[in-house]
Amino acid sequence: MGRAETAAFGSDIVAETLRSLDIPYIALNPGASFRGLHDSLVNHLGNDRPQMLLCLHEEHAVAIAQGYAKVTGKAMAVAVHSNVGLFHATMAIFNAWCDRMPVLVIGATGPLDAEKRRPWIDWIHTARDQGAIVRNYIKWDDQPASPGAAREALIRATWIAETLPAGPVYVNLDAWMQEAPLAAPLPPLDPRRLAPKIEQRPAAEDVDRVAAMLRAAKRPLILVGRVSRSERGWAERIALAEAVGARVLTDLKVGAGFPTDHRLSLAPPGVFPLPPAHAALEQADVVLSLDWIALNGVLPSRPAAQVIHVSLDHHLHNGWSMDHQALAPVDQLIAADPDALVSALCRALAVASGAVETAVVTSPESGLESADAAGPLLVSDLAVRLRAALAGRLVSLLHLPLSWDGAFWPFRHPLDFIGSDGGGGIGAGPGISVGAALALRGSGRLPVSICGDGDFLMGVTALWTAVHYKLPLLLVVANNRSFFNDEVHQERVARARGRPVENKWIGQRMTDPEIDLAGMARAQGAEGFGPVTARAELDQAYRRAIAVVEAGGVAVVDVRVEPGYTPAMASALTRETKIRETKE
């Protein structure tokens, strides 16, 4: 592919800046408002660093960037077409915001100079303040008016996005600025000097105080929330817990932060903590929270323990979004990177961390499957038989459904599970999975995603991008033919009002006709298997699908499961409901 050697237009400067920031990919759905940038990426840079990733929807493009960030911690670029593309992208941007993941979203607008707008189309694609569409759930935005200003805006935006607490940013480019010839060459810039790394380390006196508290504690407990995918951080968390004898609780809303089958692991991870976790929190004398997302939701209302919360998240709290959660009783807030605090504690306590083993999937324990071998498939059957089929392989779980029980699958490495969508946005699972698979390409890990049927149906066309760019991915659909979580809510409302619970399915079930999920996968170029309704069929479908992925392909297995939650999950959900009812 030929390429122009010298920057000649404003958009050439934008493209060169993305390369100087070492951004390897830019996901996009094409649009005329950034046609200048599109040309520069292709004909000036040769579609290399960044390489364009064509997506079928802007929401998928942002979700892919979020999935990439969940593995790497680095911002990928996304281009969205004017206001209409940004409107499409908003749900995924909100997910990335709640997930605290860095994403560089580049938008565009019709010419800001009204005299340069084409009739009709440029006018409807121009907004006076386009950034206002997303400003409440991004870290920063800008609308630069010149190539020089655009270069600085992109450098600043990436710097802000990746600085903890991380999050999405938005830079809106004037179409005329992109397409206008450069009046003169711009002087060179070194992004590394303009965006120095910010390390949020704890103060020495805070480290000493916490170390002393942990030494003296009889029943310490560590809550592992938002932490990095770093192997060093993983090893140091294990070393710290073992040194002070702390029990550890983890969370399915975020990526794996501690081995879930370790002797100090308090309970399997869940979206909502299980009853054993609450009992241990009642008895703890010191609680160390490593950026736990909803601290108020796990602590007793009047905790006897001394509570130490390590977080930078307060820097992002605003008056529009309530994702900051309720205030929690905290005795000491340490505004620092949780990884840095744990590392400093290990040094203060003279604790040496060991090496991290890249553990393969092991065969499941007995008793996790349904006791009724002839009965309908349950999510437990889906999980246990998938784990058995993948035994002996390195696997990363990229997405899990709400019906998942943490006891199904132990996490033994920071990349064994990368966390949820962040904002509860159904439809993000496939796109996040594609982005994570992109980041894992060449790692030796087999990317596996388990999505609910509603999530899959809203995001299925993201799989076309994975097929097109040859990103191996196994996606299993836990297909209960319902938006079942809402059935649970309708049942609770009906019971509270003395109304018939048997009507809870109306407006929830996806039947009559049944949807051919495997056919929808095949329509994107993936291999589709199912619907699978029996255990013998499930084992065979898994074997065939895994073979497809190991050969470099994308495979989808549609597993028909009964609606419902495991007893542990149901117990946790019931407790959360009682908390709400008590407050009401």
Image (spheres, rainbow, N blue to C red):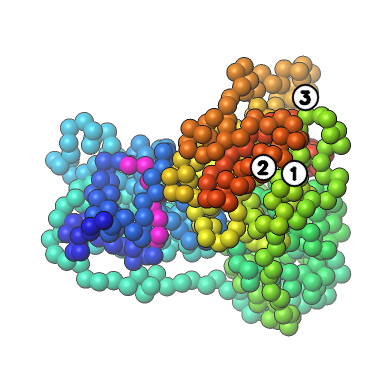
In the rendered view, tell whether residue 342 sits above or below residue 160. below
Residue 273: percent from left, percent from top: 76, 49
Residue 481: percent from left, percent from top: 65, 27
Q: Residues within 10 Å of mark 2 (few under 14, many from 20)?
A: many
**Which residue is tagged 3?**
496
Q: Judge by depth and name the residue closer to the eye, 545 or 354.
A: 545
Q: Are marks 1 and 2 in contact (CB under 8 Å)?
A: yes
CA gap, disc 2 and disc 3: 42 Å
CA gap, disc 1 and disc 3: 38 Å
Q: Amino acid at mark 1?
A: Arg
In the rendered view, tell whether residue 399 sits above or below residue 361. above
Q: Which mark is residue 385?
A: 1
Residue 202, quarter of the rendered image: bottom right
User: Residue at point 67% right, 34% down?
Assistant: 559
Q: Which residues are magenta?
A: 23-30
Q: Secondary structure at mark 2?
A: helix
Does residue 465 show up magenta in the picture? no
Point out the tag, 2 or 3, that comes first from the N-terminus. Answer: 3
Quadrant of the image for the N terminus?
bottom left
Q: Is residue 448 left or right of residue 18?
A: right
**Which residue is tagged 2?**
542
